[in-house]
Every structure is written in structure tokens, then in C-alpha cells.
Amino acid sequence: MAANDWLGLKHELPPRRRFVLLVLSFAAPLILWCLVSYVPWLWHPLVRISDPGEVEYFTEDMDIPREDFARELENARQTGAALPVGERVNPVYLPAPHAVVRSFYTAFITPPRLPGEPWLHESLGHSIRTISWAFFLSSLIGVPLGILCGAFRFFSRIHEPFIEFFRYLPAPAFGALRVAILGIDDGPKVAIIFIGTFFQQVLVIANTVRKADPALIEAAQTLGASRWMLVRRVIIPATITDIYTDMRILLGWAWTYLIVAEVVGTMSGITYFISQQARYRNFDNVYAAIAMIGIIGFTSDIALAWLGRVIFPWKRTNKRPNRFVAWCARWVGKVGSGPAPEAAS
């Protein structure tokens, strides 16, 4: 690969360049946000009144459009009245980065305004439980069914046409029906996320299973393997790493349905917190809560990717082995430093 090839066409980029691009992917939008927030002439369409002067309807800490402030300032000058004073600011719905960062701490220690309302950590815990149950139930049925559809034409023809039809139906459309059947608590929320991921899961995993190397299947059939032995001993081991990757992607898909699901029935979880903070115009807390969802999803995906390298060490792309990962893999019994005693004997 050429030293100046930053695009990585058909080649993996060096680790240092991957790290630089990773930093830039987060730094670029953050820099833009800082410019919009801290450079007054760049945007700042409002003026926050610090001294209303003799303008009747101005009040302290009032935000008004710059054009209105300029007009009233000119009127005050012409009439000889006390001039209003203010500074340019952004709308309240776009807080500065430092305010959002501060909210990552203050939102956890600030008690709810109303008795019985959940704290932020309770709302986050509730949302994580909802996602976990929904995705667990979806995978419990979707993964085996996807493997069967990918391995056997019979299951593919009898299930996939209806699943293909059903996956185009928006999951939120079933909200009222789910409330009527499952009540107003967590049942319909879990059901919405289940509907949003299950049908996609079956089709994605079935397509992955179909990519199993035909040569492996033909070799096993030549050796007399039965149908179910082919599935257990050949097809699943040949595609398990790709199925694991599909599950990681589909888990992120489940998170995208969370906000929609939590407004069904009784609003709960992080959606309730976001709604309440928006009602009180605490938009720094709103941004912090939204960012928390992204951080939880991103870190869980990184953790699952690391776990995948531990469970499936043969899929690592780097040539230099990670000693810690190799130690964890040996500890769980997936790889060993030498032949087992039984094999040696």
C-alpha cells in the first residue's frame, strides 16, 4: 500500500491512521458545535437582555431576535430613553458544549421536580432493561429461525414470504393494539422493539447462513453427515462469526426503536426524562440524555466487538496477537497453548 494512500482501497489502513480518523470523526462535529456556540458573529440569532433600559416589554434574561433588539435600541436612541443592553446568544434549544458536559454530572445528582418521578439513573436502567428483554426475546426466536431458513429451502419458502411482507409494516403502528393486549406498562414497549428487530433479524441471519461455503457442505455430505449434523457441525460453525456481527448490528437497530417504544402506554425510561427536561426547557439535560444513549450503545458495541475477538480468535485481522485477548481466550477454553492431555495421549 502506498504511503500516501489515506483511502484504504482494498487495504486496511495502518493503526496510527485509523486512530487519527477515529478522533477526527468525533472532533469535526464537536469543533463545528463549538464554533456555532462560542463565536458570536457566526450565528447567535438572539439577544439576551441584561438591562432592559426603558423599553417597556423588555425584561432581564429575555431572549429576543436581533432585528427586534436593534429596532428598539434605535427607537430608544431617538427618544433619548435609557438604552437596553444585551449580548448575542444562541436559542435555548442549542446549549453550549460546556453546559452539556456539566449536565452529565448535574443531571444525576439533581432530584426530580415532582414526587415519584424517577432519577436519571433509574430512567437509564429502565431503558436498558427494556432493550435487553426485547432483544433477548427477539434473538431467542429469530436466530434459530433464521438459521433454519438459511439452511433449508422448506423453512425459507414457508416463513420468508410473510416475513418479507411484515417487515415493511412500521412497528409503531401496532402501539395501540399492543396496549390493548399487553397493558400500559412495559409489555407494549418490549413488543414494539421486538417487532422492529425480529423480522429483520430472521432475514439477515438467513442471508448470512446461505453464504456458507458449499465445498464444506459437500465434503460433509460425502462423509455421510445427516441434515441436522450439517447444520450443527458445518453450517453454524462456518457462519457463527458473521451471525455474531449481525447480532451486534441488530442490537443497534433495537436502540433506534427505544424512544418510539417508550411513548407507548405509560411513558417511561430515558424518554420520560427527555420529555420532562424539554418541558422545563433544560435542553442541556436533553442533549446529555441523548448523548448518554449514544455512549451506552457505542461502548456496548465496542465491548461486543472485543468479546467477539476473544470468542472467535481466528477472525482477528491484525497479525500481531493481543496477549490479553489470547489469555482471555485460553481462560474460557476456546484456544490453548498446547494439545490437551487426552489428545496428547
Image: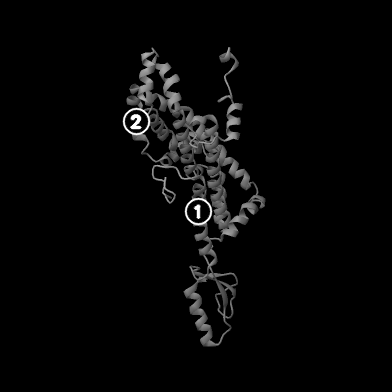
Q: Residue at x 39, y 29 (%)?
A: 206
Q: Quadrant of residue 306?
A: top right
Percent of width and height locating residue 183: 51, 36
Percent of width and height locating residue 176: 44, 40
Tell me the crowding category of disc 2: few under 14, some 14 to 19, or many 20 or more residues within 10 angstroms, Cα based: few
Residue nearest the observer in this picture, 342 or 125: 342
Figure quadrant of the C terminus = top right
Residue nearest the observer in this picture, 197 or 324: 324
Counting every numbered tag in the picture gives: 2
Q: Is residue 91 visible?
A: no
Q: Quadrant of residue 279?
A: bottom right
Q: Quadrant of residue 283?
A: bottom right
Kind of residue at badge 2: Phe
* Residue denoted by label 2: 162
Kind of residue at badge 1: Leu
| Residue 328 located left or right of residue 139 | right
Residue nearest the observer in this picture, 89 or 345: 345
Q: Do the CB atoms of the residues marked 2 and 1 lie less than 8 Å apart?
A: no
Percent of width and height locating residue 163: 36, 32
Q: Secondary structure at mark 1?
A: helix
| Residue 252 located left or right of residue 150 | right
Q: Secondary structure at mark 2?
A: helix
Mark 2 or mark 1, earlier in chain? 1
Tell me the crowding category of disc 1: few under 14, some 14 to 19, or many 20 or more residues within 10 angstroms, Cα based: few
Percent of width and height locating residue 111: 66, 51
Q: Residue at x 65, y 49 (%)?
A: 115
Distance, label 2 to label 1, CA atoms, is 44 Å
* Residue denoted by label 1: 24
Q: Residue at x 37, y 23 (%)?
A: 151
